[in-house]
Image (spheres, helix red, strand yellow):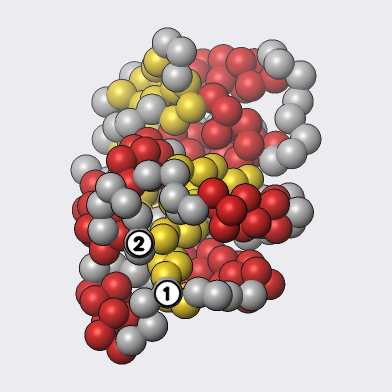
Amino acid sequence: MLRVCIVLSKSILNILLIEDNWVIAQQVTEFLSAHNWHIDYADNAKLGIQLACENIFDVILLDLNLLDMDGLEVCATIKSQAQVIPPILMLTARDSFADKAAGFKQGADDYLTKPYDLRELALRCQALARRSDLHQSTHITVGKLELVLSTKSALIDGQECALTSIGFSILTLLAKTYPEPIPRSLIIHKIWADSPPESDALKSHIYALRKALEIHPSAPKLKTVMNVGYRLEC
């Protein structure tokens, strides 16, 4: 199963905040949203793990002192179960070396102790996103499909598949989440950020992408998942 560490956008980040203190969550969400970043919020570990495993995030902000599960366990679970492995920034009042060592051992990518400056939090999010971007795979293979990210080329059995720029971007998202589906809303956010097109635009691009793939008999099939989005099927 394909599992890669990725960042899909350098300037507009998709962030998951797992924090059960509503006051802190509101402050973080309002500050980071002012950067035109998209913030998803979970107020408990169970929901946080679910969102982390069902979606693509550039960075996850994880409070260690959750009521329903220790943050270290949440971190380890996300790192082991997410189809696309996100960088995790731990937020906590635990400031001893032993606490930090335990966090990094469970897969944390960075550690910020409370109270923290929200400006520093934003800078660390950007740094984690850039770091992940430097280490992401340049090739993605799904069945007979190979995507070369550096040249934005799609090859099927070694033959190039003609795609538009947006078609390639959508196919890359689908390949990175394969075999899980990706929600329509997340595709729209990743492709068009905060300037979504007319409602039928994504549908038109999906139609064109499906037709381009169907020209090649050995290509993965682009399937619609009712009330969710789309996925690839080999």
Identify the residue shown where x is 47% and y is 77%. 113
Q: Can you see residue 187?
A: yes
Identify the residue shown where x is 27% and y is 26%. 234
- Residue that protrudes farthest toward the top in the picture: 226
Task: Quadrant for residue 231, please give it.
Answer: top left
Task: Quadrant for residue 174, please give it.
Answer: top left
Labelled pair 1, 2 in contact (Cβ < 8 Å): yes
Could you tell me the amino acid type at mark 1? Ala
Given residues 66 and 162, the one toward you in this image is 66
State left or right for residue 206 relative to residue 63.
Answer: right
Q: Which residue is mark 2?
A: 65
Density class for disc 2 (Cα within 10 Å; few <14, some 14-19, many ≥20) is some
144, above or below 22, in the image: above
- Residue that protrudes farthest toward the bottom in the picture: 97
Identify the residue shown where x is 24% and y is 68%. 106
State left or right for residue 178 relative to residue 183.
Answer: left
Q: Position of residue 29 (x, y in %)?
A: 63, 51
Distance Cα–Cα, label 1 vs label 2: 8 Å
State left or right for residue 100 relative to residue 110.
Answer: left
Q: Position of residue 108 (x, y in %)?
A: 34, 69
Given residues 207 and 7, the one toward you in this image is 7
Identify the residue shown where x is 70% and y is 58%. 31
Q: Secondary structure at mark 1?
A: loop
Q: Position of residue 6 (x, y in %)?
A: 45, 56
Indicate which disc, 1 or 2, sits on the residue closer to the N terminus: 2
Q: Secondary structure at mark 2?
A: loop
Which mark, residue 93?
Answer: 1
Quarter placement of the N terminus:
top left
Could you tell me the amino acid type at mark 2? Asn
